Amino acid sequence: DELYSEVPYDPKDVSYVEAHSTGTVVGDPEECDAIEKVFCPDRSGPLLVGSVKSNIGHSEPAAGICSITKCIIAIQTNLIPPNIHYTEPRKDVPSLLNGHLKVVDEATPLDGPLVAVNSFGFGGANAHALLHAHTRKKVPNRRPSDDLPRLVVWSGRTIEAVDQFLEGIAKHNFDPELCALTHNIQRKELAKMNNRGYAVLGRRDDGTTVIMQKSVSKARKTLPKFAIVFGQMDYDWQTTLRAFEKFPPFKSSVEQCLSLLKAPEYDCIFSKDQHATILQRAVWTLIVQVSVYHTLKAIGLKVDQYGGYSIGQITCAYIDGVLSLADAIRVAFTHGVLLGPYHNPETFNYRDIITDKDLNAKLTSVLQSFLFAKPTDKWKTATSVLSFRIYDPKASAQIFNKIDSDAVVLQPLPSIQSTDNIVKSFLATVGRAFVDGQHCQLLELYPEVKFPVSLETPMIAPLIQWEHSIDWHVANFQTKKMVDQGSNHYTVTLAEQEYIAGHCIDGRVLIPATEYLYLVWDSFTSKTGTIPNEVAVEFMEVEFLRATTITSGQTVTLFVEINDISGHFEVTEGSTLVVKGYIQRLNNFKPHAIQQRNTQAATLPTKDFYKELRLRGYHYGGFFKSVLESAADGSFANIEWKGNWTALLDCMLQIAIIAVDSRSLVIPTRIESIKIDPIQQKSSLLANAENVLFYNVCFDRDLNLLQSSGIEIRGLNASTIARRLPPGVPVLESYKFYPYFSQQTIQPAQAASIILQTILDNQTTLVCAVTEIHSKTRDPIVSLFGDAIGDLPLVKAHLTLLSSAKPEPIPNVTISEDKLMKQRNVLLLICENLFNDDEFISDAINSLSDQGFILLRESQGYQLQDSHRRLQLVSTIPIEGETFLLLQQKKSAMNTSIDAHVIKIS
């Protein structure tokens, strides 16, 4: 109710509820009852419910995410996966019996976008999530807005995992949204994924996917240097421009360059005149190279070195910051002007250009003014950009000698003529950079894909493979009885371990977490014929999985099992695992010296310390109330030694609790390490002026370290649990004698309570099924019996109102249109005018449980003249305006549905 009061959705619009439903005797009825109360009022049909635990079992900490995964599958496929092994509803779950809830036992269509999930955690941490399905659906066979191939990169634990993923992507139809999901996942480096690969995917005419190029290999251990090389003048720059123009970063860069070409002297660049061709080639080659560099920069590809020849030298000058973009275009333009006389459509005489001293001098004087910075070490060049030697074929070969020998050289613009091959080669270059260690933001390379993607986009999870090359031991549970020498059992009672009664949390006595550890310690030392006081031990990776309550007179049996080789231990109660971890003998323990930090926090004496804990829900007493004083921030404390290791360790944990500035109730769930040297600890025992023995304890919150002279507790983790709610409205009870046949008029609620007590005195039951047949002249009174039952401990009510008129809803009452003849095992049937119809009498009696009751509502002063032979009058109670007559089915009439007639034959 709290969640739905804060969101703009009505519970009755929820199409499916994924329940926690662990199959427990107590939990499932309570959860179903809560679901019915929240989701079923005003609902026209049954609510679909289910639990993934019937399919995969209880995954404990991962149970919530498993439930959400099932709901995602239902949303994706529009089919709710069925529960397995469900045959019939439980008799103690009314909401399943009355049809308000329906368990999904076969694949069922999901008829709405809203799905709810329940998840209940250890310690009372309960959660409820409301999921809204994404409504945008994929258009079948729709061509993407562009015809660009898609580069998909992937990393995995094994080469086979990467290869299978890329092959798996290609088995789906060509889908830019699916590719975008992979781009989003691989935008950052994934730890331990030591194998990388890429695939360039294209689209066939029928919409299927083809792998144009693929490569998978083991990732480099260290990231190499990356160098990029730009080449000569592009004689087919129009083809290259068309190949790249659909990449958004490339298009944006071209537009930026064109904005610098608005001066009249640049008009010839856009001319179709034959003599302007060399200008066009020079300038457009530069624009294409610069835009390709901007594209690589936009996707996050990092370049450590760069080099070029011909027009590529001018591009590198811009990349290095020697030339601005505008100046780089002017330099390319100037090259085109000066090179015009040496160019014709058939030939281009490089030798004359290189050897013409006047031409080079003219170029140097014109271009000198453009340079405004010195080249950096990143620019690897064999000639000056001010010289026409950049066109020397020998200079182009020298570029590669200048680049570091261990660098990865990228050539994003090779001399390839077809548009498809140009794009494929460029994407393969980016893919190889990823394989060699780069991480690229490929989402920036393509037209925008809106997230979340369309509803029917294929899932990625089934394509992911993991490394399974290492063999692990698997438990073999044989039916024959095994001899286990590592097991000890301990019996815990409050009569024997009286001190445990002082460990009271939130009104309940719990077996302390440190008691389990002491029992493991005792079991560990008993193997060598020693006792805990003599053996130093270390506990590691201790996990507390379940809290165990204990009451007076109750016996709790705990089993401790320790593996002699690994030291792994488990503490179980019956078949339930309570605590697990590792234990080993501790040798040469040398704890750090205890250093009390300077703190401004107040010092809390015992009274104030435990008052603060009591406000948080801890009602400690006895041995567990041993903190003599403590800093309010828990940085230091003195703990009295009462000869009990369980209490001492628990009081140390109390110091960590007080250090948390919160009134939440927390319990320990995991401890990284506990080192205990009992001999060293006892050697540091101190005494105060009252001769009270105590230990000094310090807590370092930054290191999460509790420390005494011989005890070190590191890595304490605790979980917040819900406090128990206060009890409801108190019930004031009194004992009074009330006659079965009274003349005194009383209130209807009091009459209902008297009738209920009369029934329960004669029937032993924990579920009271009360059914009322709706009267056309009187208001229903079935809810009065629900209130009376609510005042009784353990007894539950199952209230039903049979009506064909659809009356107003009544809280906690099921309204049904069923006929009386369909009712069975009714403890109390409320009706009127019982004796007007013999068939009605038969149906009423047959609906009752053994020795069930019928309550007649008759007019005031009504007197029953002649009862039915199968019923006996028990009580008459006058109320205002009516008379209640309570009748019980006679024992001799039980299970008899046909009137018997005796015929005497003489």
Image (tube, rainbow, N blue to C red):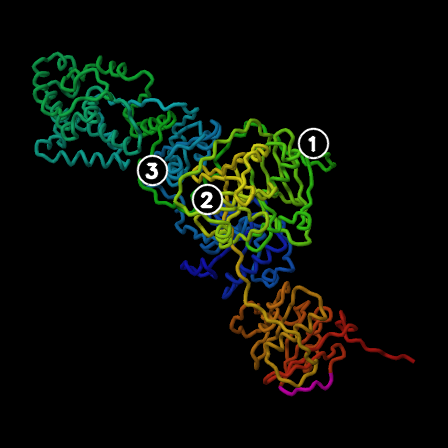
Q: Tell me the crowding category of disc 2: few under 14, some 14 to 19, or many 20 or more residues within 10 angstroms, Cα based.
A: many
Name the spot of residue 375 as percent of width and height, x first: 19, 21
Magenta span: chief secondary structure = loop
Tell me the kind of residue under disc 2. Gly
Q: Which mark identifies residue 529?
A: 1
The disc at residue 634 is 2
Q: Decide: is 355 above or below 223.
A: above
Q: Dot 3 surroundings within 10 Å: few (below 14), some, or many (20 or more)?
A: some
Q: Nearer the viewer, residue 616 or 348?
A: 616
- Does the magenta-highlighted stretch encompass residue 732? no
Q: Is residue 865 magenta?
A: yes
Between the residue at mark 2 and the residue at mark 3, the CA separation in whole angstroms equals 50 Å
Mark 3 residue element:
helix
- Foreground tag (1 vs 3): 1
Which quadrant holds residue 410? top left
Label 3 sits on residue: 443
372 to 809, vertically: above or below: above
Q: Quick check: marks 2 and 1 in contact, CB under 8 Å?
A: no
Name, please, the residue furthest toward the bottom: 861
Q: Quadrant of residue 3?
A: bottom left
Residue at image position (60%, 60%) is 96
Tell me if 219 is positioned left or right of 472 in this view. Answer: left
